[in-house]
Image (cartoon, rainbow, N blue to C red):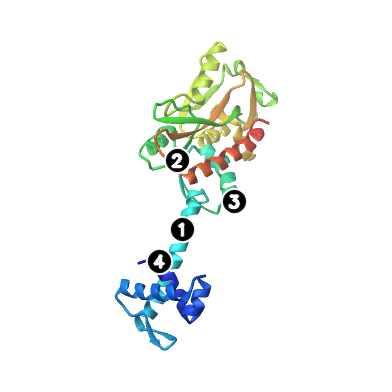
């Protein structure tokens, strides 16, 4: 169906005459009359009963007017939504991320999105790096946020933020009295570390720092999630290391967190995407907002 002719037909109905409709459409009367007749021929129906100069809708004309209004509204809304999608202000983003990103980065991202671009819907899958890589490569997510460094030919990686590692100590631990702690001070401690599912991560950096200080850490627990490990520290099971963003939790139920002075260990959150995959305007806008939020939070994490 020719949408231009449909629009002209609806204008004739609403204006009540060809003459008034021609004025509203900024055209002359004869071409509009010809257009309406061609529209009837196209549809093979009579839309108007012509009684002299007056027009009366036929039952088919009434039906088309009602359905035509819905069709034009749908067409206009679709065009508007297409423009919004192209400009990155409407659509869906599928994201895979680590727990820390979900806890500390995404709430601020969503707050900003809801304020600036409320028509963006985000689907989040939380997991380790291997899981996120698998979801990315199978096109189940558009963007990944991981803490490990990923080196693969099909993956593009960029640093979202860098933050210091903090030492988590059990209550009443003798090192709680120190403002900052050297790795060498931990020689006789029990270490609770999280395994790295892909590449190198926090545990690898901690073990390397200990070995450079002349000892091999006594690792009594290997875990996968930071919060359960922190709960074990609270129970006195040992010490662990967490990104400085966890100090934002500011909870009395969490261990004492102290900075490391020698050496200062850092960890990164990285954005990963597929190199050969088209990046939609929605995903680009989401990334821009995420990077803006991360830049503001970096100063907090490093304070």
Horizontal relation, residue 87 to residue 251: left or right: left
Which of the two discs, 2 and 3, labels the residue nearer the N terminus?
Answer: 3
Q: Residue at x 43, y 63 (%)?
A: 75
Q: Which residue is mark 3?
A: 116
Mark 2, Cα crowd under 10 Å, few <14 / some 14-19 / many 20+, is few
Report the Cα–Cα distance between label 3 and label 4.
33 Å
Which of the two discs, 1 and 4, labels the residue nearer the N terminus?
Answer: 4
Q: Which residue is mark 2?
A: 279
- In the picture as drawn, the residue positioned furthest to the left comes out as 44
Q: Residue at x 70, y 25 (%)?
A: 177
Mark 3, Cα crowd under 10 Å, few <14 / some 14-19 / many 20+, is few
Q: Which residue is mark 4?
A: 3
Which of the two discs, 3 and 4, labels the residue nearer the N terminus?
Answer: 4
CB contact under 8 Å: marks 2 and 3:
no
CB contact under 8 Å: marks 1 and 4:
no
Looking at the picture, tell me which residue is in the foreground, 102 or 116: 116
Label count reads 4
CB contact under 8 Å: marks 3 and 4:
no
Which of the two discs, 3 and 1, labels the residue nearer the N terminus?
Answer: 1
Which of the two discs, 2 and 1, labels the residue nearer the N terminus?
Answer: 1
Checking the image for residue 79, the label placed there is 1
Which of the two discs, 2 and 4, labels the residue nearer the N terminus?
Answer: 4
Q: Which quadrant is the C terminus positioned in?
A: top right
Foreground disc of the pair 3, 4: 4
């Amino acid at each position: 169906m020719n949408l231009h002719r449909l629009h002209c037909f609806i204008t004739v109905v609403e204006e009540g005459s060809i003459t008034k409709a021609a004025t509203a459409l900024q055209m002359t009367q004869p071409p509009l009359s010809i257009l309406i007749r061609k529209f009837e021929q196209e549809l093979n129906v009579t839309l108007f009963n012509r009684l002299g100069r007056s027009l009366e809708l036929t039952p088919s004309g009434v039906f088309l007017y009602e359905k035509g209004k819905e069709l034009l509204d749908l067409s206009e809304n679709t065009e508007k939504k297409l423009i919004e999608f192209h400009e990155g202000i409407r659509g869906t983003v599928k994201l895979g991320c680590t727990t820390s990103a979900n806890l500390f980065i995404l709430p601020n991202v969503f707050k900003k999105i809801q304020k600036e671009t409320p028509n963006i819907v985000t689907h989040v899958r939380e997991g380790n790096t291997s899981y996120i890589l698998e979801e990315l490569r199978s096109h189940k997510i558009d963007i990944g946020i991981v803490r490990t460094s990923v080196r693969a030919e099909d993956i593009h990686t960029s640093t979202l933020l860098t933050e210091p590692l903090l030492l988590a100590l059990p209550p009443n631990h003798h090192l709680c009295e120190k403002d900052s702690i050297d790795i060498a001070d931990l020689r006789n401690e029990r270490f609770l570390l999280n395994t790295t599912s892909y590449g190198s991560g926090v545990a690898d950096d901690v073990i390397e720092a200990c070995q450079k200080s002349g000892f091999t850490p006594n690792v009594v627990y290997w875990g996968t999630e930071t919060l359960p490990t922190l709960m074990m520290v609270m129970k006195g099971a040992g010490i662990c290391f967490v990104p400085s963003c966890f100090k934002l939790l500011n909870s009395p139920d969490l261990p004492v967190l102290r900075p490391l002075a020698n050496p200062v260990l850092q960890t990164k959150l990285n954005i990963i995407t597929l190199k050969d995959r088209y990046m939609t305007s929605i995903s680009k806008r989401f990334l821009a907002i995420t990077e803006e939020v991360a830049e503001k939070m970096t100063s907090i994490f490093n304070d």
